[in-house]
Amino acid sequence: MKWIAIAGTWRNTNAQVEKDVREEVSKIIASGDGIVTGGALGVDFFAIDEALQMNPSATQIKIVLPSTLARYTAHYRKRAGEGVISSKQAESLIAQLESVHAVSPSSIIENMTTEVIDKNAYFARITEIIEMADELVAFQVNASEGTQDTIDKAKKKGIGVRVFGYTIPEQKSQ
């Protein structure tokens, strides 16, 4: 089995991005391969949701978190409280991660040492995702920095990279 990294923006997506993510993940899961992703909103959320629909046992999913699941959950609730994301978004993501953990605890890869979830923790998570991956499928919106970092790391590792590029007007926080 090959592990395909799925990466992309959490901040700014649309119906086309979601459709493309779901189609690619559907092909990966149907082929018997697995996805490795970061457990965030947006692209990661769509990818995990699609993979779970096709394989409810979550055996073809690896989710790399920048911290422990408990700390990550608290972080998302804090971000909702700050108005960066909505409470609905935070709770949907938390429910998704907890459901994966319930059926396949080994599918959630926690970073037990991260105390502060910040840009450095997210970029370290990207490095770990690429270390686990045999290929990368990236969904890059508006030349996002995080997705570009993922693409650069995959190219440096020498694995196959496919990039879906999008330009979407920036949205206000929800």
Image (spheres, rainbow, N blue to C red):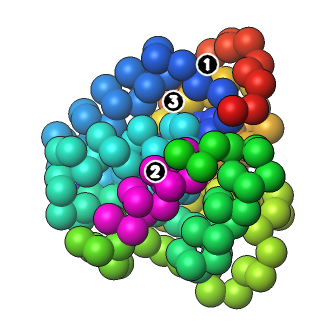
Please tell me which residue lies in front, 14 or 124.
14
Query: Which tag, 2 or 1, sits closer to the chain's start?
Result: 2
Q: Is residue 122 above or below residue 71?
A: above
Q: Which image quarter holds the C terminus?
A: top right
Image quarter of residue 14: top right
Find numbered disc 1 in the image and state the secondary structure of the residue it sits on: strand
Q: Residue at x 79, y 38 (%)?
A: 145
Labels 1 & 3 near each other (Cβ < 8 A):
no
Q: Residue at x 43, y 72 (%)?
A: 108
Please tell me which residue lies in front, 89 or 113.
89
**Residue occupied by mark 2:** 92
Q: Is residue 136 above or below residue 111?
A: above
Q: Residue at x 42, y 30 (%)?
A: 21
Query: Which tag, 2 or 3, sits closer to the chain's start?
Result: 2
Percent across and percent down for residue 91 are: 50, 55
Mark 1 or 3: the one toward you: 1
Mark 2 or 3: the one toward you: 2
Q: Residue at x 69, y 52 (%)?
A: 80
Q: Amino acid at mark 2?
A: Ser
Percent across and percent down for residue 104 are: 27, 73
Q: Main secondary structure of the magenta part?
A: helix
Q: Tag 2: Cα neighbours inside 10 Å, few (<14), some, or many (≥20)?
A: some
Q: Amino acid at mark 3?
A: Arg
**Numbered range of the magenta stretch:** 89-99
Residue 33 showing in the rendered view:
no
Q: Is residue 93 magenta?
A: yes
Q: Is residue 58 left or right of residue 3?
A: left
Q: Is residue 102 magenta?
A: no
Q: Could you give the CA–CA distance between mark 2 and mark 1, rounded to whole angstroms?
A: 26 Å
Please tell me which residue lies in front, 98 or 58.
98
**Residue occupied by mark 3:** 162
**Residue occupied by mark 1:** 165
